[in-house]
Amino acid sequence: MISGPPAAAMVAGKAALVCAGLLDGLGARYGAGCTNGHGICDLSRLSPRSTVATSAFILAGFAPVFAARHLLS
């Protein structure tokens, strides 16, 4: 805390950032809402649809990271 926050470094190129933004928007459109809406608001209302959607979001994020770190290296 004394030295301040660490410097942020961008390791993705512009094309990867554009693709990520488009995929995020596409997922929000097909998922009938954003991940925050499903994960925070709808799970607190015990919505079965949002339980499935949030599980899918988490799995879709977990699977490629697991593959990249444990299966491909």
Image (cartoon, rainbow, N blue to C red):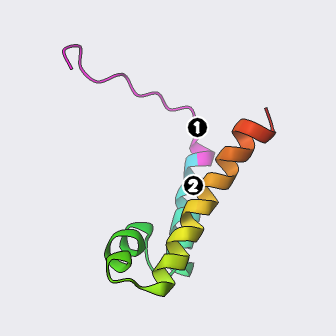
Label 1 Cα neighbours within 10 Å, binned few <14 / some 14-19 / many ≥20? few
Q: Who comes first in sequence, dot 2 or dot 1?
A: 1
Q: Main secondary structure of the magenta part?
A: loop
Q: Quadrant of residue 44?
A: bottom left
Residue name at image x 61 percent, y 61 percent: 59
Query: Helix, strand or loop at disc 2?
Result: helix
Is the residue 73 above or below the residue 49 in the image? above
Residue type indicated by callout 1: Ala
Q: Which residue is mark 1?
A: 12
Q: Secondary structure at mark 1?
A: loop
Residue at left offset 40%, top offset 28%: 8
Q: Please report contact status of discs 2 and 1: CB closer than 8 Å, yes or no.
A: yes
Quadrant housing residue 38: bottom left
- Residue 61 image point, x, y percent: 59, 55
Residue projecting furthest to the top = 3
> Residue 25 at what x, y percent from top left?
51, 68
* Figure quadrant of the N terminus: top left
Res 20 label: 2
In this rendering, is residue 15 above or below 38?
above
Picture coordinates of residue 63, whole percent (x, y): 68, 54
Please rate how many residues cluster around mark 2, counting C-alpha atoms within 10 Å: few if below 14, some from 14 to 19, many from 20: few
Asked if the magenta segment contains residue 36, the reply would be no
Specify whether residue 19 is in view.
Answer: no
Alpha carbons under labels 2 and 1: distance apart: 10 Å
Query: For this view, does 71 lie left or right of residue 30?
Result: right
Q: Which range is magenta?
A: 1-16
The answer, for residue 58, to whether it is visible in the render is yes
